[in-house]
Image (cartoon, grey):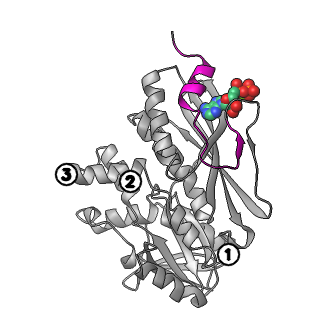
Amino acid sequence: MPLTEFEIIKKYFTHQPINSSVVTAVGDDCAIVSAVAGKRLLMSMDTLVAGRHFPESATPYQIGTRALCTSLSDLAAMGARPLWFTLGLTIPSVSEDWLREFSRGLFSIATPFKLDLIGGDTTQGPLSITIQVHGEADAEDVLKRDGAEAGDKIFVTGNLGDGAAGLAILQNKIQRHQREKDYLIDRFYAPMPQIDAGQALRGLASSAIDISDGLLADAEHIAVASQVSLVINVEQLPIHPCLKSCDQQTYLSWALAGGDDYQLLFTVNNKQLSAVYSLIERGELHATEVGRVVNTEVGVECYLHGAAYTIEHKGYQHFAP
Ligand code: ADP
Ligand code: MG
């Protein structure tokens, strides 16, 4: 006999809460939490559709990790501390193997990031996963897109292009040795949310965003929100050595427009620069300076060793013509 909806929820999605703020998690009509007075609550929702946000060949474990990593990335981008999440799960049929592995993938991310699953909805239909994450921050610490000013320096965390290269491997567009393959596929399915970086940048970054659609597309969001121009020096982009065996145009287009990296792009005012540099020097923040903010026409400009550099495809967009 396949499990009923309530048996599924009890067996795979009910855990002992980590946060003392959880009063009632899964089981009643609503979850109950106690929010801390004076703190800001931050919420973000993401839906993953099979075949669109992950290849049909993804394992349930990989779907679980990717769903939560990409959702948590939005909390990272705003400097929030993760608290709770809800899960809207639509599955075509009940497979215990699938549920066990999906749940294992999900909690392999939720537990280390101290995120409690407090509720959700379980329905039958084409595979789709919706996650809403909740986090908290002090009002003055929230990192937003609209604070960049001319004179600020631009940084990115981690490496860029790994997610797109991982996807290219999954789509058999490039070949790699097993070790590099494993690394890149892992970057696609488990892009570690930059929660620590987001927290470290509270009070230091003038603006921040997570790079989910590609550096250029997401830099454009900061440019528009802040009404400034972002100048990116392409030769400064942090690229993992294993991408550099492809031709330069290919790995640069992954880094600039690939999406799926879930690193942070942030800007820093000159007054905070030395604090950010010392975090980097002490190894407490993995970030690279890649450009500066100027006061010309709103938008993003790229230069490769001083010469204007353009690429055709700027980033992923749903409903693009
Ligand atoms: P209701 O019919 O009152 O909306 P449900 O039957 O949908 O409640 O869900 C019962 C309980 O299980 C609720 O507490 C709900 O939040 C929780 N729940 C349902 N699906 C999930 C899920 N996929 N993950 C976590 N909790 C879930
Ligand atoms: Mg319901």
Q: Residue at label 1? A: 226
Q: CA distance from mark 1 to mark 3?
A: 43 Å
> Where is residue 99 drawn, in percent x and y?
48, 28
Kindly identify which numbered label has been placed on residue 193.
Answer: none
Q: Residue at label 3? A: 177
Going by the numbered disc 1, the residue's amino acid type is: Ser
> Where is residue 122 drawn, in percent x and y?
63, 27
Instruction: Tell me the mark number nearer the camera, choosing from 1 and 3.
Output: 3
**Rendered-image quarter of ligand 1:** top right
Q: Residue at label 2? A: 187
Indicate yes or no: mark 2 CB to ligand 1 under 8 Å: no
Q: Are marks 3 and 2 in contact (CB under 8 Å)?
A: no
Which of the two labelled residues, at mark 1 and mark 2, occupies the earlier sequence position?
2
Going by the numbered disc 3, the residue's amino acid type is: His
Tell me where the magenta segment starts and ends, as one range.
2-25
Residue 315 lies left or right of residue 180; in this view the side is right
